[in-house]
Image (cartoon, rainbow, N blue to C red):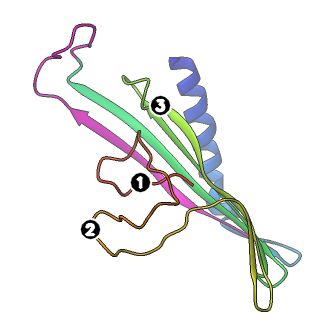
Amino acid sequence: MAKFVQRTVGGLMSLLTLAPLAAHAEFEDSVLEVSGVVASEVRLFTNNAIQAGQKNQRVNPSLVINPEFSLSWNDDLDRIDFIPYLRLDAQDKERTHFDVRELKYLHVGEDWDLIVGADKVFWGVMESKHLVDIINQNDAVEDIDGEDKLG
């Protein structure tokens, strides 16, 4: 597992180092935009493990890589968006995961739009708990405050 994590992180870090070079690359009439987040997180535990089988790990680091790719053409009337999500956790195998948050094709017509793929739909805030947000499923791994959604 450690070698997989090293290779994955190394490859992604190489890609992210080159990302600013392609952050606004134009190919004929198409535009590729790259942005996103690379973050580290450390969870600290002050007490020993309670359950049998748990490790007494006081420090638990993890790495999050969440790039966003957007390719548009035809004067921004056509666009493909891709937002993958990767978390690598040093201790908790349940938190180490890869997910595609969004992968969609968008075409804007004169009085209509077509969206095909996985997308997040935001309805706004009516209540403090987003009771009307019934389309997007909660991200059970990342969601501690009710705000993280899957596509």
Instruction: Please tell me which residue is depicted at 33% across the width and 32% down the height of the picture.
Output: 61
Distance CA(mark 1)–CA(mark 2): 14 Å
Query: In the displayed structure, does residue 1 sit left or right of residue 32?
Result: left
Question: Marks 1 and 2: CB-CB under 8 Å?
Answer: no
Instruction: Please tell me which residue is depicted at 57% across the width and 42% down the height of the picture.
Output: 99
Query: In the displayed structure, does residue 26 sit left or right of residue 128?
Result: right
Occupied quadrant, residue 73: bottom right
**Disc 2 element:** loop
Q: Quadrant location of the C terminus?
A: bottom right
Instruction: Please tell me which residue is depicted at 30% across the width and 47% down the height of the picture.
Output: 144
> Can you give x and y, in whole percent of width and height, for residue 88 in the image?
47, 33
Instruction: Please tell me which residue is depicted at 42% across the width and 32% down the height of the picture.
Output: 95
**Disc 3 element:** loop
Does the magenta portion include 49? yes
Q: Which residue is mark 3?
A: 96
Nearer-the-camera pick, 104 or 138 = 138
Distance CA(mark 3)–CA(mark 2): 29 Å
> Can you give x and y, in whole percent of width and height, for residue 84 in the image?
60, 49
Query: In the displayed structure, does residue 6 sit left or right of residue 116?
Result: left
> Can you give x and y, in whole percent of width and height, for residue 65 in the image?
51, 46
Magenta stretch: give its range: 32-56
Q: Which residue is mark 2?
A: 128
Residue 148 disc label: 1
